[in-house]
Amino acid sequence: MKALTFSSFGNSDVLEYIEIPNPQLKNAEILVEMKAIGLNFADVYRRKGNYHLKGNPPFIAGYEGAGIVVDANNNPEFKVGDRVAFADAPFANAELVAVNINHVLPLPEAISFEVAASILLQGLTAHYLATDSHKTQKGETVLIHAVAGGVGQFLTQISKLLGTKVIGLTSSSEKAKVALEQGADHVLLYNEDWKSELFKINPKGVDVVYDSIGNTLATSFEVTKECGQVVFFGMAGGDPEPVDPRMLMDGSKTLTGGDLWSYLNSKEERIKRANQLFDWIIEGKITLLPPTTFKLSEGKLAHDYLESRKSTGKIILIP
């Protein structure tokens, strides 16, 4: 089979599209012929050598995608031709992927391979943030950093579904337009005096801030109201400053960390959460921007485009 690989760490020049042996299936695995693969910043971090990575050189990144079962490997709940997807199985950047049956998500006919590869990691992240990390209540006001990014767009739509007012933060007027189209009530720009603008909208501050930037954490607490919460789930802008427990006590504020893998902890949880997303899409309650598509053989171009931060929708790879 062909796969997008790298044998050393570095910029996108280390990526190679090469022929490698097909996966050897273990007992609880099925073989999936990939039809669409999601590209994520974690794959860039893996390529650079600063994120967890499975296997040996040549390394294969990717954890998210959708395709068709080509070998059920005597696992009775699957058959050849089944449409499936996954959000947390390694070595996805290949024509064929061995997937543990506990990680397989049945794919409804109404959900295309491209949509599945576009929504699972980012959509499931937004889902747990709004329903577990913070138990969203109708009438709340939420602030979403990087609101025009993949997680930000889904988190906006899910928060609106749950009855909140959404304030977004982003870096440009073009991205602000995207966020408003996704349902945000207000979008503020990082390069302006956004804190002052936020307090004009909500004088007491917001109920919850979703912070995926990291070095903005102190500011996130400044705009959180008494008894409010900050959910910290990423460090796209760098490590945060240490948090002073006295500040938390004085304002009765809460800091919560978030990581998707804490919630995708069983086959049943994966399927339940994915089906909720699929239902919302089928019912038209969540919409997706069309993904930017590259051939798997064009992996270098896809990585470069992702790192340029010019994209506002999902980037997917097609074998």
Image: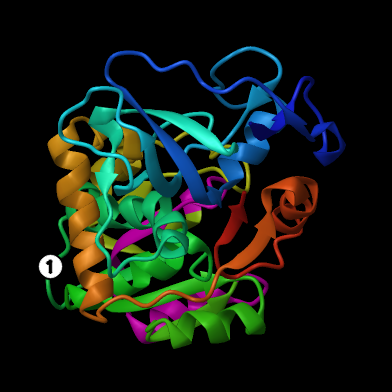
| Residue 52 in the image, given as x and y percentages of width and height | 54, 23
Looking at the image, can residue 164 be seen? no
| Residue 131 in the image, given as x and y percentages of width and height | 18, 55
**Residue 193 is inside the magenta segment:** yes
| Range drawn in magenta | 190-218
Looking at numbered disc 1 in the image, what kind of residue is underneath it? Gln
Q: Is residue 258 above or below residue 27?
A: below
- Which residue: 52% across, 34% down? 96
Q: How many discs mark residues in the rendered view?
A: 1
| Residue 290 in the image, given as x and y percentages of width and height | 53, 75
Residue with the mark numbered 1: 137
- Which residue: 60% across, 78% down? 175
**Residue 81 is inside the magenta segment:** no
Q: Nearer the viewer, residue 1 or 216?
A: 1
Q: Is residue 301 above or below residue 23?
A: below
Looking at the image, can residue 57 be seen? yes
- Which residue: 22% across, 37% down? 78
Query: Helix, strand or loop at disc 1?
Result: loop
Left or right: where 1 falls relative to 33: right
Q: Nearer the viewer, residue 156 or 92?
A: 92
What residue occupies the far right of the structure in this picture? 13
- Which residue: 62% across, 41% down? 238
Q: Nearer the viewer, residue 266 or 116?
A: 116
Q: Residues within 10 Å of mark 1 (few under 14, many from 20)?
A: some
| Protein image colouring | rainbow
Q: Is residue 196 above or below residue 293?
A: below
